[in-house]
Image (cartoon, helix red, strand yellow):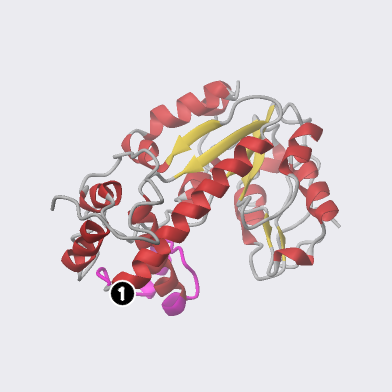
């Protein structure tokens, strides 16, 4: 098992010119913008981040030991995805096609959803104490859930939940959607619980030092600064000087102003006001990109009488 077990054509581990200068485990959740973030990292010719390195349905199909061995290998050599479905092409696109095999990498690592892919991450990081831990998060939970609804619609129409510019020309997805407010609230509550579990897992995994956080909103606001600060933290500032490889150009489908994305914006807002969660109302209302938020409280409006907020 390990680097050669990918059943989706992801490719196995590949030895290259010397060990990388820096290794990093990037923890993330779905619909956080991590595909976009990974693309920006892989645009640098001396950086390889294996996108969603384990993607199995069900997750239990691989043992804890198999997953541990695969991720240990991925923190030493460029390693493809371990998957049970047709998700394997990124290793070819991001590593082989960009000829990264021909040079020494400054940064090597992977992204993984620790809530979905269950294993002992603390044990992994103890085995690789030199590796950095990065958490990539999207702080606007409301926009995250809207993105999830749109992603499900896009998958149903186009067979994928993220579209490149070329795919967007062929497959048309409506720019505005209508969301059932009760379903939307249930998804918000589940997302808040998921994010709390995510935080617990990431911080328990960090055995060698602090967790470095990168937010989707900061990346929107100032990409150059975020990447410069990240590579500086990793001790890999030289990566910024590397020639940028070609990028796929993923299309952002959801407007930053949700008034333009939701047909029933007013109905959704009225529901959040009634639930009494001021934090989520503020996240819905913000129209600008790059606005970050602190974690929203989970208890307000959940499982008890709600307290209306000022509208």
Towards the viewer: 125 or 204: 204
Splitting the image into 4 quarters, where does residue 133 fall?
top right
In this figure, which residue is indicated by the disc labeled 1?
180
Q: Residue visible at 57% across and 35% down?
A: 134
| Left or right of 271 in this view: 232 | right
Q: Is residue 4 magenta?
A: no
Q: Residue visible at 19% across and 68% down?
A: 267
Splitting the image into 4 quarters, where does residue 185 fall?
bottom left
Towards the viewer: 182 or 166: 182
Towards the viewer: 224 or 296: 296
Camera sees residue 2: no
> Where is residue 250 shown, x and y percent of the image?
42, 56
Which contiguous range is marked in magenta? Answer: 156-177
* Figure check: 261 above or below 94: below
* Figure check: 197 above or below 187: above
* Figure check: 247 above or below 130: below
> Where is residue 268 shown, x and y percent of the image?
23, 65
Q: How many marks?
A: 1
Quarter of the picture containing the N terminus is bottom right
Q: Residues within 10 Å of mark 1 (few under 14, many from 20)?
A: few
* Figure check: 61 above or below 203: below
Camera sees residue 102: yes
| Left or right of 120 in this view: 158 | left
Q: Residue visible at 37% across and 36% down?
A: 218
Q: Residue visible at 42% across and 53% down?
A: 249
């Amino acid at each position: 098992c390990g680097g050669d077990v990918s059943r989706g054509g992801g490719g196995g581990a590949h030895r290259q010119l010397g060990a990388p200068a820096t290794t990093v485990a990037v923890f993330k959740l779905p619909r956080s913008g991590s595909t976009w973030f990974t693309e920006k990292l892989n645009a640098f010719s001396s950086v390889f981040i294996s996108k969603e390195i384990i993607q199995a349905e069900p997750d239990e199909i691989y043992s804890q030991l198999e997953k541990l061995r695969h991720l240990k290998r991925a923190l030493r050599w460029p390693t493809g995805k371990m998957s049970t479905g047709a998700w394997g092409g990124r290793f070819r696109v991001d590593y082989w096609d960009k000829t990264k095999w021909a040079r020494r990498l400054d940064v090597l690592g992977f992204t993984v959803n620790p809530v979905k892919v269950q294993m002992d991450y603390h044990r992994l990081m103890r085995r690789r104490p030199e590796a950095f831990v990065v958490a990539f998060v999207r702080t606007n939970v409301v926009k995250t859930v809207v993105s999830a609804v749109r992603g499900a619609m896009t998958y149903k129409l186009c067979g994928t939940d993220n579209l490149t510019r070329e795919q967007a020309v062929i497959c048309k997805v409506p720019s505005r959607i209508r969301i059932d407010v009760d379903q939307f609230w249930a998804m918000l509550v589940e997302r808040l619980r998921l994010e709390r579990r995510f935080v617990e897992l990431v911080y328990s995994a960090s055995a060698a030092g602090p967790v470095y956080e990168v937010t989707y909103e900061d990346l929107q606001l100032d990409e150059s600064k975020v990447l410069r600060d990240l590579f500086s933290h990793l001790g890999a500032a030289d990566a910024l000087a590397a020639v940028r490889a070609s990028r796929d150009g993923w299309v952002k489908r959801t407007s930053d102003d949700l008034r333009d994305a939701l047909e029933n914006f007013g109905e959704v807002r009225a529901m959040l006001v009634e639930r009494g969660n001021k934090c989520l109302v503020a996240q819905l209302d913000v129209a600008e990109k790059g606005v970050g938020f602190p974690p929203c409280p989970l208890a307000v409006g959940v499982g008890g009488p709600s307290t209306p907020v000022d509208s």
